Image (spheres, rainbow, N blue to C red):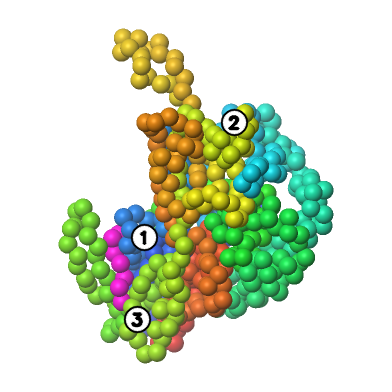
Amino acid sequence: MVAASMEMQHPLPKSNPGSSTQTHPTENKKVAVIGSGLAGATTAYYLHNFIREHQNVDITIFERESQIGGRIKSVKYRGLTIEVGAPSASTNDAFFLKAMKDVGLSPKRLDARWMMQRMETVGVWNGPALINYEPHEPQCTTWWELLLAVWKDGEQPWALRKLSRPSWWNLARLMWRYGLSPWTLDRSSSANRRSLNKFGPETPSWKRQPFSGLGSELRNAGLEDGVLDPADVFFRKLNLSDSFLVEVVGPLSRARFAQNIEDIRGIAAEVAYEEHYARKVSVQDGNYRLVERLIALSKASVKLYSKVKEIRKGVSKQYRLLVESLPHSTKPDVSQSWEEFDAVVIASPFCMNDIRWDGDGTDAPVARNTVSKPVTHVTHFASSRGISPTFLNLSPNMILPTHILTTANISSMPEIFSISLVGIITYIDTIYCHPRNMEDCDTVAHERIYRIESSEYLDDSILVQMVDGEAGFAFPFVHRQVWRFIAPTFDTLQQSFDEYELATHMYYTGGVDDVFPSLELSCRMGYHTADRIFVDFERDRWRSR
């Protein structure tokens, strides 16, 4: 259910134009946001929203890359929007849906032909065989949603989504195979989802304590004991069967986080399990539009190719930042400059920053969490041929599912976490049409778009093997992306993730990535960081009177 959109109005008295407080205009507050991903963009947007009626604020976003978005990245191919970064959220993600609604964007609507003609299927490849091969329709609507849409919008039933089986059907099917383990996990994940929805509630700050930190907020939310431990440890406490973990939970965790269950937290594995059976939500024309819109409405100044190298105590303001302008096509030289700010938000993981802190004993938080993280390679390609079963050592006549998950310890090099058919493009191929007969050309071509997550780089020779192509086979579209820190590794599971206010007016949103990274948690951290900055600034303003 989408959370009701609510613009927070803080009941702080406005200044009387005739009072003495207006005789000396106050200088604008300056806030630096390091990182232009969803957390940074959400922080900038809601800070501007909260503070604009009370005082002026100048927001500057520093981004070391050539474009905004962080791990949200969308590309176009033949008019199709392809998410090469974080693919989607789900209908459980209230704050993501709230942010989308607040900035006037709408969810992506599935193409009617796709909904009516294509059946989603999923299977798990364990090396020698495909197991758990079955229909999978999480994006379909249920009866009551269908009737509500028809009553509200007057749309014809056959123009809407196909009907999916109720959730209890999936649970019953899993229990038939794996006993009580699915029921136990379903109860645990549902309870922890309800608790997670209480994390950083959408409640005005004057009705609650200001957001204090990630760990304390998670504890206050009421998560189960042990759910923040490594998933394999937590699931052993729940007495889940080995076959259920290996054949269901493990592959879903690998597809979602590119990690095995012993390398992620219990809450992350439960989220992967729950999201698999939830309906996916993405922004129409690309999730990148949400970040772009949030930043545009925040009126923030965005500085691309700008890396924050060092943070020091400020002279006229709280902090001084040493900003290095990285070389690029229009400015090949490297330059450095100092800028001062009243508050700093570090909106990306520490391991992706390398910021020096020249302060008085508070350097530990910024230096922490700099251990190397594994990278995940995400490859998208278009092909007139589908994935060949022989690549997976299966019968050449087998029809493969649209989503292929994998179990751990498969002897595939590089290790493949998942293969998904994300789209089919149909178009008129005019390559071999004579120019004089172009209007009569009716050669219809079909291309499949695949997404593959792997531990290493997939070159064209491996992709050709996947589609059983001959020598010289060419792909019309290939996009490769390397993502760091998709999920925390075992070493970071042993570390504290409660650091939020690193120093006075210095905040860190990346702690959620040490729990599990998601679009929803990034939105929640950005929203409450903006609220926290607003409260702190107002407190300072009233104290100075």
Name the front one of labels 2 and 3. 2
On screen, residue 115 above or below 284: above
Q: Is residue 308 on the magenta stretch?
A: yes
Q: Which residue lies furthest to the bottom in this view?
A: 360
Q: Magenta stretch: dominant SS?
A: strand
Q: How crowded is mark 2: few (under 14 residues within 10 Å), some or many (20 or more)?
A: few
Q: Residue at x 69, y 69 (%)?
A: 234
Task: Name the residue carrying label 1.
Answer: 299
Residue 357's disc number: 3
Indicate whether 212 appears above or below 125.
below
Comes first in the chain, label 2 or label 3: 3
Q: Mark 2 points at which residue?
A: 396
- Examine the structure image and report whether residue 349 is included in the region drawn in magenta: no
Query: Between tags 3 and 1, which lies in front?
Result: 3
Q: What residue type is labelled 2?
A: Pro
Q: Identify the mark nearer the N-term, 2 or 1.
A: 1
